[in-house]
Amino acid sequence: MRLWKRASGVLKDKNSLWLASLTKRTSLRNPDIEAAVIKATSHDEFSIDFKNSDRVYKCIRFSPSHIKPLVWSISNRMDRTRYWVVALKGLMLMHGVINCKVPSVPKIGRLPFDLSNFKDGHQKSGKIWPHNAFVRAYYRFLDQKSVFVFQTYVGEGRDAHKVFGIMQELVLLQKLQVLLDLLMQIKPLSNAAMVPLVLEAMDRIVIEIFDVYGEICRGIAIVLMNIYSSGKVEATMALKILQKAMIQGEQLSSYFEFCHDIGVVNASKLPSIERVPEDGILELEQIIKGFSEKSWDAEWVQKQQEEKAIVVRDTQEEKAIVMNSRNDFKTIITDKWEKFDEDLIIISQENPTAVSKNPFSAASLTLPPPQHHQELPDLISFL
């Protein structure tokens, strides 16, 4: 039965190569690239064509125009297959493409094919479910990795750190931690899935895990060096990231032990995992506590200032009232006499018709007309 399945796979690959040779060369189709993709993703479970995989990588490094026909070829191959071997080889090939340091690769974005619900159609589900689970987990990571590379390319990654500051670094670390969680979900779930092809894929996953965790450690170092000039929001985010990094460090140790036990070569070559120092977490907790105390002190100071402002405002209002009352008393210089009660007409009690006037009035001060006095007699002459 296995011999018949291998022969059937060889016939399918040859048929696909013949159809690719008949393809006209366009901006979207390239017969040479399609042939290299078919050979790199053959139905042979016990061999991997590294030669044609390298040809694919060289094509996209040689010319950015090759990225479109390459993505189309891989996508077409993944959409048509129902064999876990072809699907896994296609994911491994796409993984290598995404890791190529070529400016045109980040523009891919989301993967143009969907293997999130992949089911092998050549074997019974009771025996093949570990392989299906492995392919699905690999696809989930690779799809998010492609999105992450695209976001970094458009300026949302560490390249924009100088512009966006520590907050951008924290967001980048959160995304890297999500990728690390997805990577640790990629592993064979039973002994039936521990075949050479799966172990080869695990070698690549282990290298990817080490690269991602290294980026996380570098990002945490940057955050800890700049956290003192940040605010409470940034410090709180950093604390959560460090706490998660400690958990992930423990999970990675168990994951690498598992990989070493099942025979993954690269798991035994990697250095030991660097753990996040607990001192950094304690410092962040103290910083957040300090922000809380400063916030309380600021609120108390603001309250005291408001109370003082109210007292000052009331005092100023009282002074304004006093000054206004003082301003009511003014000295006026005029040529007109001020009239008092004596200026009023006084009615005599004995003769109501008689009227007396104020002796200081202008009429009272008028001199009487001169009168002729009678001359006194000369007393001497009488004698």
Image (cartoon, grey):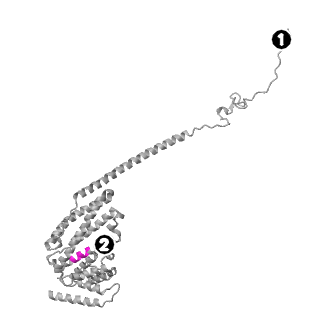
From the viewer's side, name the closer residue of 259 and 133. Answer: 259
The C terminus, quarter of image? top right
Residue 182 location, x and y as percent?
24, 71
Residue at 18%, 72% (x, y): give it.
266
The part of the chain drawn in magenta is 134-141
The N terminus, quarter of image? bottom left
- Is 138 contained in the magenta span? yes
Q: Is residue 377 above or below residue 75?
A: above
- Find disc 1 in the rendering and name its residue: 379
Whole-Å distance between the Cαs marked 2 and 1? 151 Å
Q: Label 1 is placed on what type of residue?
A: Leu
- Find disc 2 in the rendering and name its residue: 149
Give the mark, 2 or 1, whose residue is nearer the N terminus.
2
Q: Residue 362 occupies which quadrant of the picture?
A: top right
Q: Is residue 283 above or below residue 344?
A: below
Give the main secondary structure, helix, strand or loop, of the magenta stretch: helix
Q: Label 2 is placed on what type of residue?
A: Val
Q: Is residue 1 visible?
A: no
Residue at 51%, 42% (x, y): give it.
321
Position of residue 61 in the picture relative to residue 343 (left or right): left
SS for tag 2? Answer: helix
Residue 255 location, x and y as percent?
18, 69
Query: Of circles 2 and 1, which is in front?
Result: 2
Label 2: few (<14), some (14–19) or many (≥20) C-alpha neighbours in 10 Å: many
Position of residue 147 in the picture relative to residue 327 (left or right): left
Q: Is residue 341 above or below residue 46?
A: above
Position of residue 336 in the picture relative to residue 204 (left or right): right
- Is 21 contained in the magenta span? no
Q: Is residue 342 above or below residue 169?
A: above
From the viewer's side, name the closer residue of 137 and 249. Answer: 249
SS for tag 1? Answer: helix
Residue 327 location, x and y as percent?
56, 40
